[in-house]
Amino acid sequence: MGIMDYFNVVTVDYDDYEFVYSISKMHEKYHYNDTGVKPHIYIPWTPQHLHEDIDLNYVLRLCHQNQEKSL
């Protein structure tokens, strides 16, 4: 949630690190304020996220399942 509140993202490259920040913010009365955009699929954060890309693995599983259905 809140992904829609900021836009015009700028990246500053520091060789081994990239700093990403927004230079614009939505108007305070924008209709997504206080609610954000609710995800279709919620994947709660766990400490395992530090070792494995849980979100990407979930998406890949969905892709494989859809591919198998279409065969």
Image (cartoon, rainbow, N blue to C red):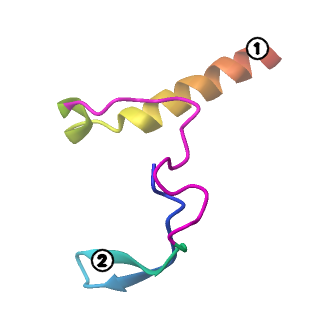
x and y, in percent, of residue 1 in the image: 45, 48
Characterize the local packing of mark 2: few (<14), some (14-19) or many (20 or more) Cα atoms within 10 angstroms: few
Position in image of residue 57 (x %, y %): 44, 31
Q: Residue at x 61, y 57 (%)?
A: 31
Mark 2 touches mark 1? (CB < 8 Å): no
Q: Nearer the viewer, residue 34 or 51?
A: 34
Q: Which residue is mark 2?
A: 19
Q: Nearer the viewer, residue 38 or 59?
A: 38
Q: Residue at x 34, y 29 (%)?
A: 44
Q: Tell whether 55 sits left or right of 26.
A: left
Which corner quadrant of the image does residue 43 belong to?
top left
Task: Give how far across and how far down residue 69 sits, in percent.
Answer: 76, 14
Outermost residue toward the front in this view: 29
Q: Bounds of the magenta span?
A: 28-46
Give the spatial CA distance, label 2 vs label 1. Answer: 41 Å
Direction from residue 60 to residue 57 in the image, left or right: left
Question: How would you classify the magenta stretch by its main secondary structure?
Answer: loop
In the rendered image, which residue does mark 1 sit on? 69
Could you tell which of marks 2 and 1 lies nearer the N-terminus?
2
Q: Residue at x 46, y 52 (%)?
A: 34
Amino acid at the residue labelled 2: Phe
Image location of residue 49, percent across then percent down: 26, 36
Q: Amino acid at mark 1?
A: Lys
Is 34 part of what is drawn in magenta?
yes
Residue 22 is one of the magenta-drawn residues: no
Secondary structure at numbered mark 2: strand
In this rendering, is residue 16 above or below 1?
below
> For the point 72% across and 23% down, which residue is it?
67
Quadrant where the C terminus is found in the figure? top right
Q: Secondary structure at mark 1?
A: helix
Q: Nearer the viewer, residue 10 or 28?
A: 28
Tell me which corner region of the image, top left, top right, bottom left or bottom right, holds residue 4.
bottom right
